Amino acid sequence: MALTDTAVRQAKPKEKPYKLSDSQGLYLDVRPGGSKLWRLKYRIAGKEKLYAIGSYPEISLSDARIERDKARKLIAIGTDPVHDRKEQGRARALADGNTFDGLATEWLAYNSPRWAKSTAYKANLYLKNALIPVLGTRPVAKITRPELVDFIRSIEKRETFDVAKKCRQWLNQIFRYALAKGLIQYNPATDLDIVAAAGPRVRHHPFVPPAELPALLDAVANYKGNFLTKCAVRLLMLTAVRPGELRAAPWSEFDLDNALWTIPADRMKMRRAHVVPLPKQAVAILRDLELLTGRFDLVFAGRNDPKRPMSENTINKCLGDLGYKGRQTGHGFRHMLSTELNGKGYNKDWIERQLAHGDNDEIRATYNHAQYIDQRRDMMQWWADRLEQLETSSNVIPVDFQRG
């Protein structure tokens, strides 16, 4: 027999849960603690399932029957009411703008003007390719720490430990943003590194020792691959800029007549404009490149699309093809320069300014930037001359003088 309001109201808890059946699969689940829960038992695709309608008295008997009838209409057309409810919840969350997708997109838009273009580009890639496909439709306030741990572990199982590390970093920043906005009460992405899987030991940004530098220079000089790639490797050696700063460099930043390259703040990691004095060898390379790509905006215009820079992996692939995989990277030339110049006694401030490393004292940073151009020009010309000398030598040539 169908239930009545009186029967539902007077149902008392017992030592064990029990059911009071209504009709067409609807029943009241009475729990030992006193709660009364409406449930609908149904079958779809040959499987028996349960649909949680809600609790009594918040949902009355008549309201429960209305929800039952709605669910049965969905079942009749092959739609699972449980899945339908989830989809509706996701749609509402999207409309409210409180999904991970909405939050992460807002976070990226807020921070991109403060970052170098390369940083914003990488953050966007991680959002699109790793984070949003998994977490995008989830309401931010319902994402839990165990859920994020499971997500990161799924990446670690693929042995892509660098991706896992970056995802932990981006997640922490995104949820800090949500916390500041008052969308969540705590940050579920803190301390994820504590349970991170141990990846293989990697030597970051390796570079060859001085004794092997002549052989590397000879290998680059005889590289038979793409000419632009060869020039990119040589310019990294001669300038010690970051690979991303070189790859995306437009011709408008170069003053070849005065041998200066001025990189604007929005392309720099530290968000400060950086002036790079160009040794004569670098100017010669750029003059050759101008004949090839001078009609485009970018110095290293992409082969398939000149509006896009050469691929991020091009330089390291070239070095790998030359036999230096794991021994020399594009970024490693910066470490090489720092090691060599410090070893020769050059002023540390000149070297740090050449590498565009940060300075916590903004006034001092501005002063140093203005004062060190001439000193750095001499220093980098010495370095370029030394590389040129080593290119045809089988041994490192000692230098007798010191600079300071």
Image (spheres, rainbow, N blue to C red):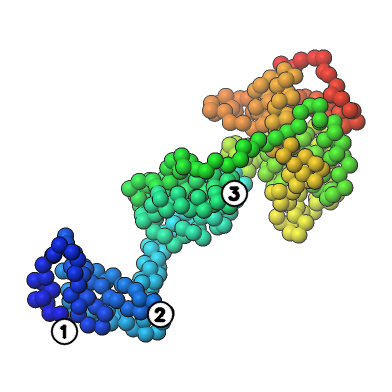
Residue type highlighted by circle 3: Thr
- Residue 143 figure quarter: bottom left
**Sequence-wise first label, 3 or 2:** 2
Quadrant of the frame with the C terminus: top right
Disc 1 target residue: 1
Disc 3 target residue: 160
- Spot occupied by residue 14 in the image (x, y as percentages of width and height): 13, 64
Q: Is residue 123 left or right of residue 218?
A: left
Residue type highlighted by circle 2: Gly
Disc 1/disc 3 C-alpha distance (Å): 60 Å
Image label count: 3
Disc 2 target residue: 46
- Spot occupied by residue 351 in the image (x, y as percentages of width and height): 68, 26
At horizontal 71% and vertical 51% (from top left) the residue drawn is 311
Q: Is residue 312 visible?
A: yes
Which structural element holds mark 3? Answer: loop
Disc 3/disc 2 C-alpha distance (Å): 40 Å
